[in-house]
Image: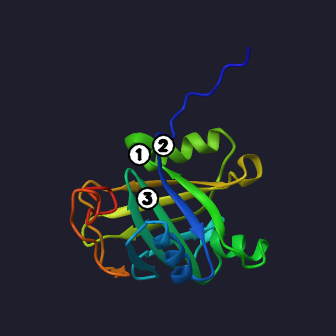
Amino acid sequence: MQKLPTPFLGSIAEVCIVTPDHRKTMDGLLRLGIGPFQVFDFTSSTVPERSFRGRPGSYELKVCFAKQGSLTFEIMQPVAGESLMAEYLDQRGGKEGVQHIAFDCENIPMQERKRQMRERGYEPAMEGVWMGNKGTCHFCFFDTEDSTGTIFESIDFSHDWEDPDFKWYPQPPERDESNNDAGKDLRGK
């Protein structure tokens, strides 16, 4: 009997839909009760360290998040530069869809996550360091699509993370007993 590798991915933290029109996708999810969304711009000033397929990256993205229980729904729209998201839309004739899922990897340092993924045959395809008002979030997408059918992402927020400036869509959440996650930061704090 074959011995299975030790699991290390942890819990699914995020499901991402890549789209050519982030507002249209947000509106569709809002009709299902998912939202409101925090809307961020990933640019050279907000994500100063970027790489794509092993070389410096110049991608820019519109990134939107909505908490739904312990899961985050993410919407990404490529704005400029080469990215996995732009490739995904090109391969699908511009049609949106679920492009990746992200795992929390249960407090394993990012370098160790990358080592373990490489050990399993998966190289980083795109990564960056996103600047918060305090702290950073290191994200890394791995080239898992050919063998799993989707991209796997790992996200690592620093302990002092505070969300950077963003806009709410369509409006800030209301605080009530039925939506205990509204208004929490991206780590759920």
Secondary structure beneath disc 3?
strand
Secondary structure beneath disc 2?
helix
Q: Residue 58: in sight, yes or no?
A: no
Pinpoint residue 142: horizontal percent, then vertical percent: 62, 54
Indicate the amino acid at tag 1: Pro
Mark 3 = which residue?
72
Q: Residue at x 32, y 81 (%)?
A: 171
Mark 2 = which residue?
112
> Is residue 137 left or right of 54 when viewed as pictured?
left
Mark 1 = which residue?
109
Q: Residues within 10 Å of mark 2 (few under 14, many from 20)?
A: few
Discs 1, 3 touching: Cβ within 8 Å:
no
Residue 98 location, quadrant: bottom right
Discs 2, 1 touching: Cβ within 8 Å:
yes
Residue 187 location, quadrant: bottom left
Considering depth in this image, is 94 or 48 the residue closer to the camera? Answer: 94
CA gap between label 1 and label 3 equals 21 Å
Indicate the amino acid at tag 2: Glu
Pinpoint residue 160: horizontal percent, then vertical percent: 23, 58
Considering depth in this image, is 7 or 28 the residue closer to the camera? Answer: 28
